[in-house]
Image: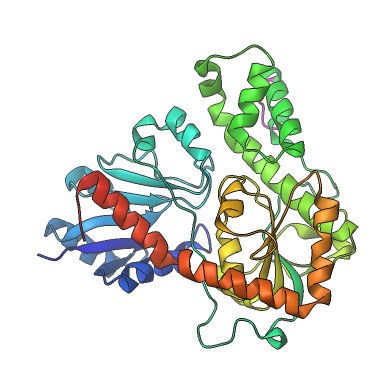
Amino acid sequence: MDKVIVVFGRSGHHTSLRPISLGLADGFRKLGKKVAFCDCDDFDSINACFELFAAGKVAFGIGLNGCGMTWDIEGVGEVNLYEKYDVPHVSVMLDLPYNKCATGMEKPCARHIVTLLDYSALEYMKYAYPDKAADAIFLPLAGMEYSADRSVFDAEEKPYDVVVSAGTWGMNWGEENLARQWHENGTGRYIANILDDAADYLECNADNVLPALKLALAARGMLGEDYLRKMLPYCWDLLLYIKSYRRIKAVELLVRNDLPVDVFGSGWERVAFADKLRLHGPVSYEESLHVAAQAKIIFQDQAEFNHGAHDRVFTGMLNGAVVVSEFSRYLADEFEEGRDLFLFDWQDGEKQVQVIKELLADESKRLATAVSAYGKADRRHRWQHRAERILEAVNVLYDIEV
């Protein structure tokens, strides 16, 4: 009996949930697999999904951030499909596992694969979710194309020179500086001191939260793993702070070098240099794809993905934009710098972002880079490529071939 892959999707919580879920489902279909899309906001779709599980027709389920693992049913309470049916589930993370919105790791599931967007996230999983870490795989989100019915390289279709598509947060009205929220939420002063040292390090180094905490603890002679485990709940506060800090710092780098920038996202009206930005406000995920298709250059901070990647990088490439990104070891290995993309770091950023002026002044150079990047992203970074990796992981771990 042929079995199907159930892809769970829904609207709400984050605008990317539904379009990425549909993209993932389409990726499996392009590999010739049978897919049932379960719309978790539609009662009939949910019932049809339950029937597939009950009939033993499901090879495995997959959803973003644990979507589809549990259900709140009126009169029954919380129901977990995977406690009743011995079917694997794949949780595709939208962020680092210590982002409180990236749920799914804690749900009961005997055969559970969790995808990670950054290689360094595995160490956190080993401490926080040791039973899930064994089955985790590194899998960045894939890029998506706005439309297959248009030329992605037509300069006349690209009115935006440099685009930043991301929100920022953490500033109080009337203030220009980011708040370190652990000083405002009742965190004890000893813990706050450790978090301050970790944040100071992250402001100067392209590293992730967990290594920063380890360094702050080691400086105090706290070398045992129990110290680090006690600090894990504070990774979320550090992530919220440093992610927004680096994003603001990256855009400020453009402004300081007199580079034009169109910003799509919330919160930017509060930054000190807001009057130097072309502000467009927040957009939906679908609208952000259109923005990527209209951009000559996508400028991307990596936040916590210095050993991984954000899907904005691949989406930019698949829509004919040149990507200028904060350094990532993974991106440096995947692409040829100076031919497929351009990377910057905090030490030499002032000099490195000058390439943006060169690209805007030389359309032939910009186009050659965009074409080269598109070719590699088209061969390796669409959703069918991620679907192939997931199928391999399910087969290796659970001997399931769909």
Residue 190 percent location from the top left of the image: 69, 17
For this orientation, the residue located farthest to the left is 1
Q: On screen, 399 above or below 184?
A: below
Q: Please give the name of the residue rendered at 74% of the width and 70% of the height, measured from the top-left corner.
A: 280
Residue situated in front as seen by the camera: 271 or 172: 271
Q: On screen, 231 above or below 344?
A: above
Relative side of 335 to 201, left or right: left
Residue 135 percent location from the top left of the image: 34, 40
Q: Please give the name of the residue rendered at 47% of the width and 61% of the height, measured from the top-left corner.
A: 17
Image quadrant holding the N terminus, namely: bottom left
Magenta residues, start to end = 184-188
Residue situated in front as seen by the camera: 335 or 226: 335
Magenta-drawn stretch, dominant element (helix, strand or loop): loop
Residue situated in front as seen by the camera: 19 or 161: 161
Relative side of 145 to 46, left or right: right
For this orientation, the residue located farthest to the top is 221
Q: On screen, 62 above or below 136?
A: below
Residue 304 location, quadrant: top right
Total marks placed: 0
Residue 275 percent location from the top left of the image: 89, 64
